[in-house]
Image (spheres, rainbow, N blue to C red):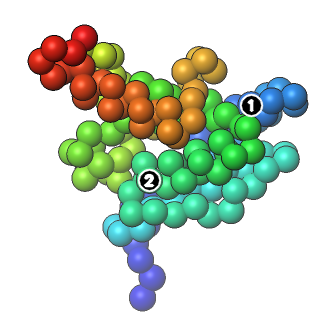
Amino acid sequence: MTALTILDMESSLRLYTEGKGFADAVLIVEADAHHPWVQLISADFDSGKVDGKKLFYCMQSLHGMLDALDMKLLCNGFRYDVYPSGMALDMGHGMMACKMVKGQPAKELVNIIDPTDDIDAIVSVDEQKAFRREWLDSFRPGKE
């Protein structure tokens, strides 16, 4: 018996490579009830299927893969200021994530596979995690 597909979509994005510039890319996203995966395809790159327990974790694995190649995928899930809450991870495989501003509760949810034009907001996985820690710390007494 095959698993029922609950998510099957594509997102047209831009991929930036240092020294080469921008290229069009397609992000394929699929998931059944228990197993999401993503695949990024452009003229010069094919990630193969990248899977994980949640869609956001698939995207983080892809993000790390691209970091190692000095590539930036211009999507919300790769922004420094976007990270899912625990509830967002539990609902919809983490497709939606909070947009964070230090010292302010998250008010805006964004789709992690939607495109962004702000290349300066695209950072490494480690920088994204560090900003989330800084955002959380900004709510502790004595912090900005």
Which residue is drawn at the image coordinates 68% and 62% (left, top)? 48
Q: Quadrant of residue 23?
A: top right
Name the residue at the front extreme. 142
Amino acid type, residue under disc 2 in the picture: Tyr
Residue 15 location (% of width, % of height): 72, 35
Place residue 5 in its image quadrant. bottom left
Pointer 2 residue = 57
Determine the secondary structure under disc 2. helix
Q: Amino acid at mark 1?
A: Tyr
Report the side of 36 relative to 64 (left or right): left
Residue placed at 72% from the left, 37% from the top?
71
First in sequence, mark 1 or 2: give its number: 1
Helix or strand or loop: what does disc 1 sit on? strand
Residue 138 location in percent, x, y?
Answer: 24, 19
Q: Residue at x 44, y 53 (%)?
A: 57
The local crowd at label 1, few if under 14, some if 14 to 19, many if 20 or more residues have their Cα within 10 Å, is some
- Is 68 on the left-hand or right-hand side of 137? right
Residue under circle 1? 16
Name the foreground residue: 75 vs 2: 75
Residue nearest the viewer, comparing 113 with 60: 60
Characterize the local packing of mark 2: few (<14), some (14-19) or many (20 or more) Cα atoms within 10 angstroms: some
| Residue 114 percent coordinates (x, y) | 51, 33
